[in-house]
Image (cartoon, rainbow, N blue to C red):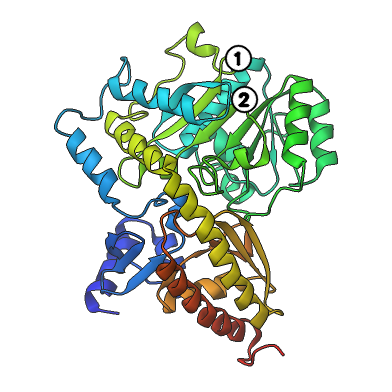
Amino acid sequence: MSQAKEDFLERSKEYWNPGKTSDWQRFGVDLVIDRREGYFLYDMDGKRLIDVHLNGGTYNVGHRNPEVVQAVRAGMDHFDMGNHHFPSLMRTKLAEKLAEVTPPGLHYSIYGSGGAEAIDIALKTARHATQRRKIISIQRCYHGHTGLAVQTGDQRFSKLFLSEGDPNEIVQVPFNDWEAMEAAIRVGDAACVIMETIPATYGFPMPKEGYLQAIKRACEKAGTLYIADEVQTGLMRCGEMWGIDTYGVVPDILVTGKGLSGGIYPIAAVVASERAAAWLKEDGFGHMSTFGGAELGCIAALKVIEICQRPETRSIVHYIADYVRKGLNLIQAQYPDFFIGIRQRGVVMGLEFNHEKGAMHVMKALYDNGVWAIFSTLDPRVLQFKPGILYDRFLCDEVLNRLETAVGQARAAAFGRARRAA
């Protein structure tokens, strides 16, 4: 490590975030991102990393995607952030596009500056529509760090700030436990069920066949709204525009963010049905967000959606998903006692390891081998492995080759021996 980086990390600990900076160093990751381009990150010391984390899908179309950058640059000749109080050319244009590309019946767009804020908007929207307070969510879920969002999620993030949800208002049930979910909905006093279509921070466990459809049917029967958190699974990551599309479920409210920004200008959106969004007609000033729906962010989002809608993008995603899976199967076959599972929907992937901190070992080995992927905070056995939707075959090959080496090294670190399984 250069002296310049050492000095910078000390400044980071002094003025920014001592805990997070120290934790990354403890994990053996001394990354300070400097230049970034396409699906590559460059450390301030010049080390190149292939990005297979994408900051939760924020860089779905790559870092500094030239088309998104150009759209925002051109937009700056006419637009700035805008004024959130008034009708806006770009906000309305994006809302029209979101109504077009989201599941049938979703119509109104309500904007935030990030996914967690959008989750708060969605939950408030459901409470108004149903005049109920109770929220049903999944154990070990994650929906962000703002007020309602953090209460709805795992105590890993809420307890620190004394923000655990009131058990009379926040009911959590195990993922994929239909009986527990059905029992919670059947009471008939919940405003909504909120779910990531595939829970990201829990390591991308896949919904059982028919599980999401059954939840939606139960919600309809009980007058409860279904909120699909598509912040990480949307925008072609599951092989279609929205992850929920691949399960044949039409939610009452859909939340999108992260990749909607193109990684260039923050924006998130709640797209809601006529019933769910009734408050917009009752009191349009009921929720306000200074930076929500910033017009330059809308320009970035429109370009991202255009890229995602291209037939060639869909073809690329399906090709990558199949190609990478075949490579992962071969690597898994070499280390079956360590690399024990592959969870996948499109290019949403969780790699499961037979060690309580297996994914942390793999993350470190990948970092040493020039690939950045991250372990799942709420299940460190699982590595979040998320290729971009515009990867090409050569980049897939490079990632797989480096992963093969890293898994062997991580297995040795985890089990204390370097031999491959017989």
Residue type indicated by callout 1: Arg
Q: Position of residue 258 (x, y in %)?
A: 43, 44
User: What label sits on residue 252 in the rendered view?
Assistant: 2
Quadrant the C terminus occupies: bottom right
Q: From where the camera sits, is residue 346 visible?
A: yes
* CA neighbours of label 1 inside 10 A, class few (<14), some (14 to 19), many (20+): some
Residue type indicated by callout 2: Asp
Q: From where the camera sits, is residue 163 visible?
A: no
Up-down relation of residue 184 to residue 191 (above or below): below
In screen coordinates, is 111 left or right of 333?
A: left
Q: Position of residue 121 (x, y in %)?
A: 51, 27
Query: Which residue appears at 46% of the width and 73% of the height?
Result: 397
Where is residue 96, by image quadrant? top left
* CA neighbours of label 2 inside 10 A, class few (<14), some (14 to 19), many (20+): many
Cα–Cα gap, marks 2 and 1: 8 Å
Up-down relation of residue 328 to residue 186 (above or below): below
Residue at the disc numbered 1 = 275
Query: Which residue appears at 57% of the width and 38% of the height?
Result: 229
Where is residue 337, by image quadrant? bottom right
Up-down relation of residue 47 to residue 132 (above or below): below
Asked if the residue under mark 1 is in contact with the one under mark 2, i.e. CB atoms within 8 Å, the reply is yes
Q: Position of residue 162 (x, y in %)?
A: 58, 41
Query: Which residue appears at 60% of the width and 91% of the height?
Result: 418
Please tell me which of labels 2 and 1 falls first in the chain.
2
Up-down relation of residue 161 to residue 16 (above or below): above
Q: Position of residue 15 (x, y in %)?
A: 30, 57
